[in-house]
Image: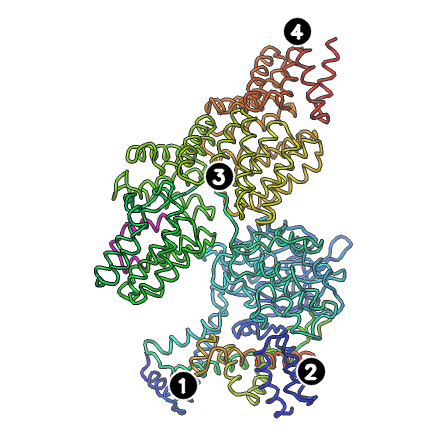
C-alpha cells in the first residue's frame, strides 16, 4: 500500500465530501492535477462514501451480538419439528436461518427455518408466539414469504419455517446496472401492495430493510420477517407497540422508532420510503451527503453523486421531479406529515407512472381542517366603544407624548391602557369597526419598531398584545411575526410574559394545522407557567383548554372531552357561570361531546350557554353568533331541522349585522340554513340559497377552497335529493376536484365525495362501477378505523356501507349485503347513543336485506325497533320512519297479512314523501309495494292507480331496477 | 467504590500513562463481563454500544466524575477495550470452526461469501489499523463513535474540534473502511 498516496487521497476525500455532490467531479479534476493514481483512488473512495456497509452502518454492539449468535450454529441433520436442517443460510438480528426440508407424500418441501436465538425465549414470549403465529400464518400474499410452520425446539427456543425464496437481496438488485426506473417502481408498487395488504390484516412489519426483501428471477419482490418483530416482543414492555431496541437496524429505523415511540403504519411508510430511495438511486439513504439538499431534491442528488458508480439504466434525470417529492414525503421525520397510509404512497407512485399530478405536492402544513362547527373564542376584555372613537384619532399621539415623558413605570400603565384599547377592538365587540381596527393595529405595529427601541420590556409586552389582536382578526402571519418579535426581548425578570408569547404561538400553530408544534409549545408554556406563575390558575385552565382543542383537532374526541370537562369544572368553580372563560369552555365541551357522538348532551350544554349569554349581554349580543351556529348543527344532528333552521336564521341575522357581506362565516351560516331547508322538504328554496352561497365563496381573490368545496358538495347533495342527478354530479364532481388537489387521498372529505359520486353511478344504473368505487372507499375508511374512531369517521363509514348495501341489493346479491348490514348495525350501536337516526337506518337496512332473503322472522323485530327509534326523534326522522315501515310492510305482505301490509306501506309512502320527496324513487318503490298490498287485499282500483304511477316513474328514472319485473307482472294480472 | 480505581481514574485523567495501563485491563474485564451478561441475559435485550459503555462507566466511576480531559482518556480506553473484546471473541469463534472460517451459502446466489461476523470483525480491525496510519485522528473518531458509541457532539468536545470536522472525519473514514471491507469480502481469501 502506498501510504503517501493514501494520505493525500484521504485528505482530499475529506474536502471533497464538504462539497456538493455535483461539484465533486470538478474538485477531483482540479486537485488531482493529472495524477491518475490519485484520481482513481479518490474516485474510488467517493463511490465508497455513498455506498452502504452492513458492518459500519450498525454498531459494535450489533457486531458483538452477531458474533455471539454464530457460536450457536446447528449442525446439519438437526430436526426441528418435521423439518431437517440442511445447512445455515445466514444470520440475522433475531437468530440464524437454515435451509431445511421435510418429506411428505411423495414430495420434498424446502423452507427457510429461522431459529430464534437464546435469550428471546422467555415464557411470556413463547406464549405470545403460540397465540400470534396464527395471525401471521394467515398472511397470504404473493409478495410476502409465507409462514409455513413453527414450533419450539427441544431446548426451548422458538423457530419459524418460512417459504424459501430464491432470490437476491434488494440492495444487490438495486446495484444492477440494467434495471431501469420503470422496473424499480413496479417492484416498489408490489412491495407497497404487500405491506398495505398486511396493514389491512392489522399486521405491521416494522423492520423493512433491504435485507428483508428478496427479489426473485422474475424481478418480483418477497418480503421476509413480516410481523416477526412484534411476535417476539417482550410483553413486559409497557408500550405495546413500541419496537424493542434489539429489532431495529439503525440505518433503516424511522425516527420515532429510535426514540422508542410507538411504531405503526407510519413507520412502515417511512421504511418503504427509505427502500424506495435506495432502490431508485442505488445510494444509501441514512447519512447520505445529499442531506444538505432540499428534501425533494435528495433523490436526484444522491444518484448524481454516484456518477458512473450508480445504475446505468437509471440516469439522474430519470429521478427529477415527482419521484423526489414522493420519497421526501414518505421519509419525513415527522410521522404526521408522511403519507397517511401505504395505499396513499402507492397511489402517488401509480400517478407518477401514469404521468398524472401527484397529491403529495400540496403543502402538508397548509391542509385545512374542515370545521363544520366553529370554536370561536369568546372575546376577552370588553372595553367601552367610546374609547375607540376617542383614540382612533388622538390615540397614537397621546401615546407618543406619554412615552417621551413618562418613566418606565408610567409607560407600563400606558401599555395597560393600550392593551385594553386593542382588546376592545376584537371584531365581536367592535360591532362593525373591523376595518378601522386593523388600520389602527397596523399603525401601532409599524411605530413599535422605532418608538420603543429603548424599552425592550415595554416593546415585548406590546408585541404580545398586537399578536393577540392580529390573532383575533384572523391575520395569522402578522400575529406570528409579532409573537416571534417578542420572544428575544424578554429579560430574565420578564420571563413570566414569555408564557403568553409561547401560548400565542401555540394557538397559531394549532390554527395552521401544525398540531405537534402546538402541543410542544403548550407544554413549554405550562412548564414556564409552573415556575414563573405557579398561582396563575387562570392560565393553567386555559392551557388545559388548548390541549383539549388540539386533541380534538387530532381526532381524539375522548381525550378532548376529558380535558374539556376538566377546564370547565375548574373555571366554573373559580369564576362562576357567567365568566367568559366558563362560557368558552362550555361551548368547547359541547363541540367535543358532539365529536364523541353524544349530540343530545352537546345541545344541552350549548342551550345553557346561550341562555347565560342572553342574560348577561342581551339578545343582540354578537357573542351569541357562534353558539347559535353550533346549536343549529347539534339540532340538525338530532333531526330537529326546524329548530336548526331557526337557530341558523338567528345566527345569520346577527352575523349580517357584524360582518362584511362576503364574510365566510356568513356563507357558512347560509349553508347550514340551506341544509335545513332541504331536510324540511323546502327543496327549491334550498337550492336557490346554495347558488348564492357558492357565488359568495367564489368572490374573494383567494377563496377559502375548503369551504367552497364543502358548499359545492352540499349543493350537489341537495340537487340529488331533489332528483336532479346531472346537477348533483356537476357540483359534487367540482367539490371532489378541489379536495383531491388539496387533501390526501384518504381524507374523509375526498372519501365522502367519492362515495356520493359512486352512489350517483349506482343511480344511473352503472352498478358494477358503483360497487367498485364504494368498496374502494370503504376499504379506506376501514383502515382509518384501525387507528381509532370518532363520530365523523363513523358517520362516513355508515353512509358508505349503506350505499354499498343498496348497490348489492340492486344487483340481487343480498346475501353478500347481509354481512355488511350486520357490521353496520354493530358499529352504529357501539358508537352512537340512542336515539340516533343512523342507528335506525342501520336496523332498517339489515331488516330489508333479511326480508330479501326471506327471513321475515328476523327482519320484523329489527324493523319495529328501527321504527321506534325513528319515532323517538319525531318530528324528525320521517325518512327513517318510512324505511322501517317499508320493511315491515313487505314482511306483512310476505306473511299474507295484506291489510296490515297496506296500512304500513301507506304510512311508509307518506313518511318517505315527507322526508324526501313524493317523486323520489324510494317513495315510488314503496308506492309500488303498496299497490301490491292493495291488490292482495282486493282493492283493485287503488292498486292499479298506484302501480301505474310507480311503474311509470321508476321506468323513467331507474329502468334497471330488478323489482320492476315483479311490479309489471302484478299489474298485468289486474286487468 | 474501590478507592484504588478512583485514584487510577483521576491519574489516568491527568495523563498518567502508568495509571492508564493499569486501568485498561480492569476496563476490559468489566466490558467483557457486561457484554456476556447482556447477550445471554434473561431479558435478551440486545445492547446498544452506548448503553454498554455507559454501564461500564457508571460502575467504575461510581459517584466520581471526570473533567473533559479525564473523560477523553477514559472513553478512548473504553473504545480500545471494546475493540479488543470483539477481536478476541472473533478469534475464538473462528478457531472453533472446522477449517478456519467456513464459507456459508446465502440466499444470494451471486454473493461470494456470507455475512460472517467473525471475519467482519477481524477485517474491520485490520482496516482500522490501516486507517490509523493514514489519519490518526479519523481513526480515533471511528473508535469513539463505532466502538464506544459516542455521538458526534461528544466526540467534538472530547477532541476539541467542531462537530462538522468530526462528521467529515467519520464520513471519510467510513468510506475508506467500507471500501476495505468490501475488497476483503470480494477477495474471498477466506474459503
4 or 1: mark nearer the eye: 4
A488 lies above or below A956: below
Quadrant of the snapshot with the N terminus of chain A: bottom right
Labels 3, 2: one chain: no
Quarter where residue A809 is shown: top right
- Graded by Cα atoms within 10 Å as few (under 14), some (14 to 19) or many (20 or more), the crowding at tag 1 reads many
**Residue A812 x, y percent position in the rendering:** 70, 29
Label 3: state its secondary structure. Answer: helix
Subunit ID for the residue under disc 3: A
Q: Is residue A361 visible?
A: yes
In the drawing, does residue A216 fall left or right of residue A361?
right
Whole-number angstrom distance, CA of label 4 to CA of label 2: 100 Å
Which residue in the protein does label 3 denote? A791
Q: Identify the mark nearer the N-term, 1 or 2.
A: 1
Which residue in the protein does label 4 denote? A938
A472 lies above or below A962: below
A241 lies above or below A900: below
Subunit ID for the residue under disc 2: B
In the drawing, does residue A646 fall left or right of residue A139?
left
Label 2: state its secondary structure. Answer: loop
Label 4: state its secondary structure. Answer: loop
Which residue in the protein does label 1 denote? B23
3 or 1: mark nearer the eye: 3
Which residue in the protein does label 2 denote? B189
Labels 4, 2: one chain: no
Label 1: state its secondary structure. Answer: helix
Q: Which residues are drawn in magenta?
A: A527-545
Amino acid at each position: 500500500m502506498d501510504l503517501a498516496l493514501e494520505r493525500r487521497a484521504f485528505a482530499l476525500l475529506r474536502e471533497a465530501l464538504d462539497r456538493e455532490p455535483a461539484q465533486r467531479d470538478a474538485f477531483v479534476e482540479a486537485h488531482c492535477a493529472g495524477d491518475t493514481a490519485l484520481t482513481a483512488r479518490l474516485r474510488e473512495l467517493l463511490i465508497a462514501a455513498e455506498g452502504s456497509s452492513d458492518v459500519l452502518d450498525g454498531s459494535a454492539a450489533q457486531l458483538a451480538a452477531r458474533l455471539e449468535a454464530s457460536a450457536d450454529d446447528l449442525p446439519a441433520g438437526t430436526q426441528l419439528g418435521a423439518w431437517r436442517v440442511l445447512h445455515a443460510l445466514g444470520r440475522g438480528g433475531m437468530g440464524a436461518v437454515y435451509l431445511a426440508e421435510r418429506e411428505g407424500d411423495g414430495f420434498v418441501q424446502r423452507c427457510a427455518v429461522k431459529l430464534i436465538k437464546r435469550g428471546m425465549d422467555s415464557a411470556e414470549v413463547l406464549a405470545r408466539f403460540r397465540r400470534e403465529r396464527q395471525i401471521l400464518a394467515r398472511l397470504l400474499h404473493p409478495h410476502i414469504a409465507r409462514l409455513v410452520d413453527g414450533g419450539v425446539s427441544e431446548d426451548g427456543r422458538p423457530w419459524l419455517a418460512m417459504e424459501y425464496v430464491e432470490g437476491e437481496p434488494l440492495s444487490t438488485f438495486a446495484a444492477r446496472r440494467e434495471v431501469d426506473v420503470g422496473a424499480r417502481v413496479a417492484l416498489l408498487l408490489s412491495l407497497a401492495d404487500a405491506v398495505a395488504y398486511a396493514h389491512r390484516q392489522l399486521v405491521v412489519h416494522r423492520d423493512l430493510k433491504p435485507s428483508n426483501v428478496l427479489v426473485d428471477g422474475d424481478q418480483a419482490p418477497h418480503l421476509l420477517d413480516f410481523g416477526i418483530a412484534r411476535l417476539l416482543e417482550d410483553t413486559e414492555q409497557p408500550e405495546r407497540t413500541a419496537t424493542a431496541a434489539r429489532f431495529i437496524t439503525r440505518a433503516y429505523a424511522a425516527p420515532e422508532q429510535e426514540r422508542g415511540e410507538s411504531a405503526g403504519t407510519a413507520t412502515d411508510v417511512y421504511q418503504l420510503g427509505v427502500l424506495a430511495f435506495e432502490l431508485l438511486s442505488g445510494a444509501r439513504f441514512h447519512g447520505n451527503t445529499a442531506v444538505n439538499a432540499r428534501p425533494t431534491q435528495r433523490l436526484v442528488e444522491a444518484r448524481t453523486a454516484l456518477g458512473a458508480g450508480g445504475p446505468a439504466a437509471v440516469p439522474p434525470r430519470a429521478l427529477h421531479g415527482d419521484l423526489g417529492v414522493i420519497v421526501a414525503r414518505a421519509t419525513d421525520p415527522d410521522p404526521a406529515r408522511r403519507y397517511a397510509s401505504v395505499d396513499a404512497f402507492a397511489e402517488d407512485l401509480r400517478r407518477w407512472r401514469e404521468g398524472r399530478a401527484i397529491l403529495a405536492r400540496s403543502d402538508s402544513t397548509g391542509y385545512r381542517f374542515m370545521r363544520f362547527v366553529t370554536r370561536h373564542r369568546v372575546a376577552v376584555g370588553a372595553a367601552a366603544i367610546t374609547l375607540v372613537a376617542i383614540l382612533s384619532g388622538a390615540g397614537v399621539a397621546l401615546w407618543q407624548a406619554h412615552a417621551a415623558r413618562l418613566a418606565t413605570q408610567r409607560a407600563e400603565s400606558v401599555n395597560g391602557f393600550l392593551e385594553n384599547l386593542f382588546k376592545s377592538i376584537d371584531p365581536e365587540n367592535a360591532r362593525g369597526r373591523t376595518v378601522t381596527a386593523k388600520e389602527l393595529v397596523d399603525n401601532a405595529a409599524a411605530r413599535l419598531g422605532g418608538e420603543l427601541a429603548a424599552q425592550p420590556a415595554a416593546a415585548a409586552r406590546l408585541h404580545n398584545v398586537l399578536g393577540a389582536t392580529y390573532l383575533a382578526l384572523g391575520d395569522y402571519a402578522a400575529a406570528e411575526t409579532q409573537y416571534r418579535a417578542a420572544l428575544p426581548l424578554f429579560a430574565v425578570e420578564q420571563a413570566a410574559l414569555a408564557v403568553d408569547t409561547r401560548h400565542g404561538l401555540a394557538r397559531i400553530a394549532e390554527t395552521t394545522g401544525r398540531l405537534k408544534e402546538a402541543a410542544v409549545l403548550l407544554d413549554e408554556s405550562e412548564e414556564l407557567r409552573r415556575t414563573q406563575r405557579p398561582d396563575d390558575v387562570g392560565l393553567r385552565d386555559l392551557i388545559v383548554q388548548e390541549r383539549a382543542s388540539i386533541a380534538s383537532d387530532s381526532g381524539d374526541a375522548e381525550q378532548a372531552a376529558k380535558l374539556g370537562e376538566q377546564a370547565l369544572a375548574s373555571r366554573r368553580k373559580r369564576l362562576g357561570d357567567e365568566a367568559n372563560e366558563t362560557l368558552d369552555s362550555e361551548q368547547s365541551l359541547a363541540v367535543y361531546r358532539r365529536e364523541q357522538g353524544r349530540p343530545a348532551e352537546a345541545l344541552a350544554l350549548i342551550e345553557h350557554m346561550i341562555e347565560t349569554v342572553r342574560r348577561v349581554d342581551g339578545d343582540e349580543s354578537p357573542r351569541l353568533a357562534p353558539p347559535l351556529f353550533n346549536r343549529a348543527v347539534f339540532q340538525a344532528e338530532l333531526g330537529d331541522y326546524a329548530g336548526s333552521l331557526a337557530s341558523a336564521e338567528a345566527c345569520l341575522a346577527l352575523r349580517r349585522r357584524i360582518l362584511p357581506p362576503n364574510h365566510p362565516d356568513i356563507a357558512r351560516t347560509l349553508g347550514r340554513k340551506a341544509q335545513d331547508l332541504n331536510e324540511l322538504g323546502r327543496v327549491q328554496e334550498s337550492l336557490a340559497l346554495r347558488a348564492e352561497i357558492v357565488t359568495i365563496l367564489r368572490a374573494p381573490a383567494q377563496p377559502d377552497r375548503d369551504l367552497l368545496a364543502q358548499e359545492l358538495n352540499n349543493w350537489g347533495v341537495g340537487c340529488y335529493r331533489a332528483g336532479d342527478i346531472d346537477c348533483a354530479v356537476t357540483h359534487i364532481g367540482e367539490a371532489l376536484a378541489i379536495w383531491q388537489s388539496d387533501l390526501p387521498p384518504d381524507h374523509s372529505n375526498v372519501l365522502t365525495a367519492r362515495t356520493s359520486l359512486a352512489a350517483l353511478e349506482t343511480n344511473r344504473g352503472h352498478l358494477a362501477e358503483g360497487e367498485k368505487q364504494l368498496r374502494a372507499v370503504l376499504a379506506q375508511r376501514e383502515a382509518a378505523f384501525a387507528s381509532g374512531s370518532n363520530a365523523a369517521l363513523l358517520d362516513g363509514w355508515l353512509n358508505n356501507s349503506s350505499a354499498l348495501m343498496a348497490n348489492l341489493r340492486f344487483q340481487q346479491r343480498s346475501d353478500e349485503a347481509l354481512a355488511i348490514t350486520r357490521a353496520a348495525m354493530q358499529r352504529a350501536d357501539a358508537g352512537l347513543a340512542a336515539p340516533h337516526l343512523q342507528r335506525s337506518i342501520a336496523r332498517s337496512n339489515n331488516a330489508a336485506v333479511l326480508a330479501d332473503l326471506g327471513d321475515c322472522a328476523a327482519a320484523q323485530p329489527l324493523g319495529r325497533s328501527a321504527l321506534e327509534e325513528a319515532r323517538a326523534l319525531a318530528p324528525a326522522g320521517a325518512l327513517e320512519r318510512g324505511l322501517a315501515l317499508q320493511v315491515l310492510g313487505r314482511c306483512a305482505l310476505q306473511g299474507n297479512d295484506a291489510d296490515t301490509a297496506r296500512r304500513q306501506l301507506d304510512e311508509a309512502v307518506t313518511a318517505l314523501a315527507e322526508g324526501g320527496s313524493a317523486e323520489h324513487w324510494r317513495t315510488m318503490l314503496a308506492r309500488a309495494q303498496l299497490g301490491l298490498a292493495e291488490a292482495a287485499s282486493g282493492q283493485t282500483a287503488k292498486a292499479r292507480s298506484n302501480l301505474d304511477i310507480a311503474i311509470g316513474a321508476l321506468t323513467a328514472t331507474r329502468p334497471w331496477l330488478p323489482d320492476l319485473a315483479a311490479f309489471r307482472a302484478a299489474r298485468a294480472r289486474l286487468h | 467504590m474501590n478507592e484504588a480505581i478512583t485514584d487510577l481514574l483521576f491519574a489516568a485523567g491527568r495523563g498518567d500513562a502508568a495509571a492508564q495501563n493499569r486501568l485498561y485491563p480492569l476496563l476490559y474485564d468489566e466490558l467483557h463481563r457486561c457484554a456476556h451478561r447482556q447477550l445471554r441475559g434473561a431479558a435478551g435485550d440486545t445492547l446498544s454500544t452506548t448503553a454498554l459503555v455507559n454501564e461500564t462507566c457508571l460502575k467504575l466511576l461510581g459517584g466520581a466524575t471526570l473533567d473533559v480531559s479525564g473523560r477523553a482518556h477514559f472513553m478512548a480506553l473504553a473504545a480500545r477495550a471494546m475493540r479488543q473484546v470483539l477481536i478476541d471473541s472473533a478469534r475464538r469463534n473462528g478457531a472453533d470452526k472446522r477449517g478456519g472460517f467456513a464459507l456459508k451459502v446465502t440466499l444470494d446466489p451471486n454473493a461470494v461469501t456470507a455475512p460472517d461476523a467473525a471475519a467482519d470483525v477481524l477485517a474491520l480491525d485490520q482496516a482500522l489499523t490501516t486507517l490509523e496510519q493514514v489519519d490518526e485522528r479519523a481513526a480515533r473518531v471511528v473508535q469513539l463513535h463505532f466502538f464506544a458509541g459516542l455521538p458526534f457532539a461528544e466526540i467534538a468536545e472530547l477532541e476539541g474540534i467542531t462537530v462538522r470536522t468530526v462528521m467529515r472525519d467519520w464520513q471519510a473514514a467510513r468510506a475508506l473502511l467500507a471500501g476495505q471491507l468490501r475488497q476483503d469480502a470480494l477477495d474471498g481469501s477466506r474459503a
